[in-house]
Amino acid sequence: MAKRGKEQQKHVASKHVTTRRLARWQQEKRRQRITFLSGIVIIVIVLGIIVGGVAATRSSDWLSKVQTDSGTITIKKADYANELRLFQVGIYNASTMTNESPLSTLEDGYLINDKAKELGLNVSKAEIDKIILAYMGMANQSISDLDFNKNYQNMLGQLGTSDKELRDNIQVQMLGPKLIDYYINQTPTSGPQVNVSLFTISNISTANELAQKWRNGETTNNLSKEYGNKSQTGWLPKGYIGGDFDNVAFTIDMGNVSDPIPSETGYYVIQVLDRKDDTIPDSMRQMWGYSEFNTWYQQDYTAKVKRNPDLNLTELHAWALKQLS
């Protein structure tokens, strides 16, 4: 009986130890799980910091984004530095360069290429070769293909650029004038024209006041002294200014003073001096065509180009110079 009692106590004691071990194991597992989960959290935080840092670096690296027919082009700091190098080696005119010039040249290139493609304008290999010959000081000279290639490769080495890069840049420089010529050629060669005396006034109340004095017989010289901004336009073709101006200038009785006409800078007040239907001079057509080109450019740039709001052109230019030194 005594022996059985001892065995029973031993069995109970053994069971008690097992229970305590189980509790310790469970406690240890909980600690391991907590440690494991804490490790995961730390890893996630570190990765987040790394990814965020990379994203921030990438964000600060982009200068401008241009929407083209083939997708969005991102212009980066390295692109700016490379374009600045092209100014330094003489591919572009460096005499008028500003800190913004390398970036705006890149942006303009994408816009011009897109518009030229839309209109079916292009630059031939022969046209580009002619410019390259001028770069090499051999314009209008007869030269063999072998000599051309030899001199050309030497020039590329001196410029530190590739054949594709040079030709792409020459193409853009040649497409710009071709676009302007396209807009000039779209202007009419003859048509209705008007000659007016014109005041440009910034606000409607002052414009009304001037118009009334003019109708009451005040001379344009006196009005000019009081209000300024008087001009004699010369012959303006219908469509050159367009819009409300044309609606008034080509319908109002000659000699009458108009009501204020809305303009981009305020209001026009005009008096029609004469009208005719005649040939439009080439000089006027060139001005008109360039104005149309400029209107296209401003609208396209506003719609398709987005610059980094944190862009600092002075710092960017200084950074690029260091990269090229």
Image (spheres, rainbow, N blue to C red):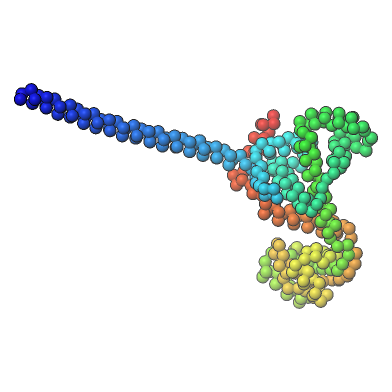
Picture coordinates of residue 225 (x, y %)? 76, 65
- Residue sitting at 8 percent across and 25 percent down? 4
In depth, the one of 222 and 44 nearer the eye is 44
Picture coordinates of residue 59 (x, y %)? 58, 42
- Residue sitting at 85 percent across and 41 percent down? 125
Displayed quadrant of residue 243: bottom right
- Residue sitting at 66 percent across and 47 percent down? 72
Q: Residue 148: tell me if it is visible.
A: yes
Tell how many labels. Answer: 0
In depth, the one of 18 and 95 nearer the eye is 18
- Residue sitting at 74 percent across and 41 percent down? 97
| 57 sits left or right of 65 in the view | left
Q: Is residue 15 above or below residue 177?
A: above
| 179 sits left or right of 12 in the view | right
Q: Residue 232: tell me if it is visible.
A: no
Of the 4 image quadrants, the one containing the C terminus is top right
Name the outermost residue toward the top.
3
Displayed quadrant of residue 222: bottom right
| 46 sits left or right of 289 in the view | left
Q: Is residue 317 above or below residue 183?
A: above
Picture coordinates of residue 198 (x, y %)? 78, 67
